[in-house]
Amino acid sequence: MGARRELYEELAPSLAGDGLVSVGVFESHFSREEYIQVFVTEGIDRSTLRLQEGRSIVELSLADTLKHPLVTDFTKETLLRSLVTND
């Protein structure tokens, strides 16, 4: 699966089994007719994460994510749409 390969390249995680669940496909806010597929997963051992390109991971609650000024509108919209879609 391409998503699993991309995750490994960016984070080097060990995913348990088939832990990726598709949230949905969303049209980019920056490029018309370009789409981004979003996945969620559980069961990642945080000690196995090796970030590439000097980036960092920040864990936020949903409420804090929706208020955070550095979280993009696209990300906020995708999170909200995924909650409606998966309920």
Image: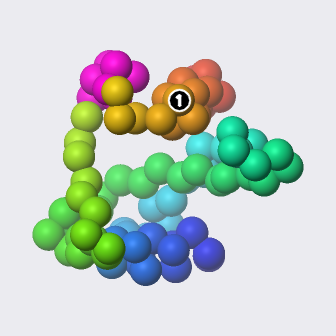
In the rendered view of the protein, which quadrant contains the N terminus?
bottom right
Magenta-span inclusion, residue 42 = no
Q: What stretch is highlighted in magenta?
A: 61-68
Taking depth in this image into account, of 31 and 24 the one nearest to the observer is 31
Q: In the visual, does 78 lie left or right of 68? A: right
Residue 26 visible somewhere in the drawing: no
Taking depth in this image into account, of 69 and 15 the one nearest to the observer is 69
Name the residue: 67% across, 52% down.
36
Q: In the visual, does 43 lie left or right of 76? A: left
Residue 75 visible somewhere in the drawing: yes
Magenta-span inclusion, residue 62 = yes
Q: In the visual, does 57 lie left or right of 42? A: left
Q: Is residue 43 above or below residue 85?
A: below
In the rendered view of the protein, which quadrant contains the C terminus?
top right
Residue tagged by mark 1? 73
The x, y position of residue 43, in whole percent, is 30, 58
> In terms of image quadrants, where is residue 14?
bottom left
Name the residue: 57% across, 35% down.
74
- The single residue placed furthest to the right in the displayed view is 33
Tally the numbered discs.
1
Task: Say what amino acid the circle numbered 1 marks.
Answer: Asp
The x, y position of residue 52, in whole percent, is 31, 75
| SS category of the residue bearing label 1 | helix
The x, y position of residue 62, in whole percent, is 35, 26
Classified by dominant secondary structure, the portion drawn in magenta counts as helix
The x, y position of residue 39, in whole percent, is 54, 52
- The single residue placed furthest to the left in the displayed view is 47
> In terms of image quadrants, where is residue 26?
top right
> Neighbour class for label 1 at 10 Å: few (<14), some, many (≥20)?
few
Name the residue: 27% across, 29% down.
61
Name the residue: 69% across, 44% down.
30
